[in-house]
Amino acid sequence: MLLKQTVTKIVPRLYNLLVDLEKEIDKKIKLLPPQPGVDPSSVSALVTDARAAAAAAENSAEVARGHAEATASSSLADEASAAKTAAAAAEESA
């Protein structure tokens, strides 16, 4: 359960950091003076690559959250099963 709570808190923060980073990159690119001999499309391609990397990181975070939720659910099911077994054993001994 702790893992699920931790991942649930981290994923939105990571996403917000990625969005903030994207905004900062856009601001800094706009502030750059034009450079002779630099193809603007190559800068755009770098920004596109950075955005794709941010999207991949977001997807990875979502996958991690899904795994954490599945693990937490599985652990809870195992604990419930163990509790039922213990209760049945206690009933039999009583």
Image (spheres, rainbow, N blue to C red):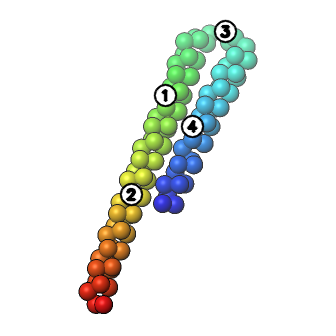
Which residue is under mark 3? 36
Asked if the residue under mark 3 is in contact with the one under mark 1, i.e. CB atoms within 8 Å, the reply is no
Judged from this view, the residue extending furthest toward the top is: 36
Label 1 secondary element = helix
Task: Give SS at disc 3.
Answer: loop
Q: Residues within 10 Å of mark 3 (few under 14, many from 20)?
A: few
N-term mark: 1 or 3? 3
Label 4 Cα neighbours within 10 Å, binned few <14 / some 14-19 / many ≥20: some
Instruction: Name which residue type carries label 1.
Output: Ala
Question: Which residue extends farthest left?
Answer: 92
> Which sits earlier in the primary sequence, circle 3 or circle 2?
3
Q: Quadrant for residue 35, please give it.
A: top right
Residue at label 2? Answer: 73
Q: CA distance from mark 4 to mark 2?
A: 24 Å
Q: CA distance from mark 4 to mark 1?
A: 13 Å
- Quarter that holds the C terminus: bottom left
Q: Which residue is mark 4?
A: 15
- Secondary structure beneath dot 4 equals helix
Instruction: Decide which of tag 2 and tag 1 comes sooner along the chain.
Output: 1
Tell me the kind of residue under disc 2: Ser
Q: Earlier in the sequence, mark 3 or mark 4?
A: 4
Q: Are marks 4 and 1 in contact (CB under 8 Å)?
A: no
Residue drawn where x is 69% and y is 16% of the image: 30
Instruction: Give the percent coordinates (x, y) of residue 91.
Output: 29, 84
Q: What is the crowding at mark 2: few (fewer than 14 residues within 10 Å), some, or many (at least 20)?
A: some
What's the distance in space between the residues labelled 3 and 2, CA to CA? Answer: 58 Å
Whole-number angstrom distance, CA of label 3 to CA of label 4: 35 Å
Q: Is residue 72 left or right of residue 44?
A: left
Residue type for callout 4: Tyr
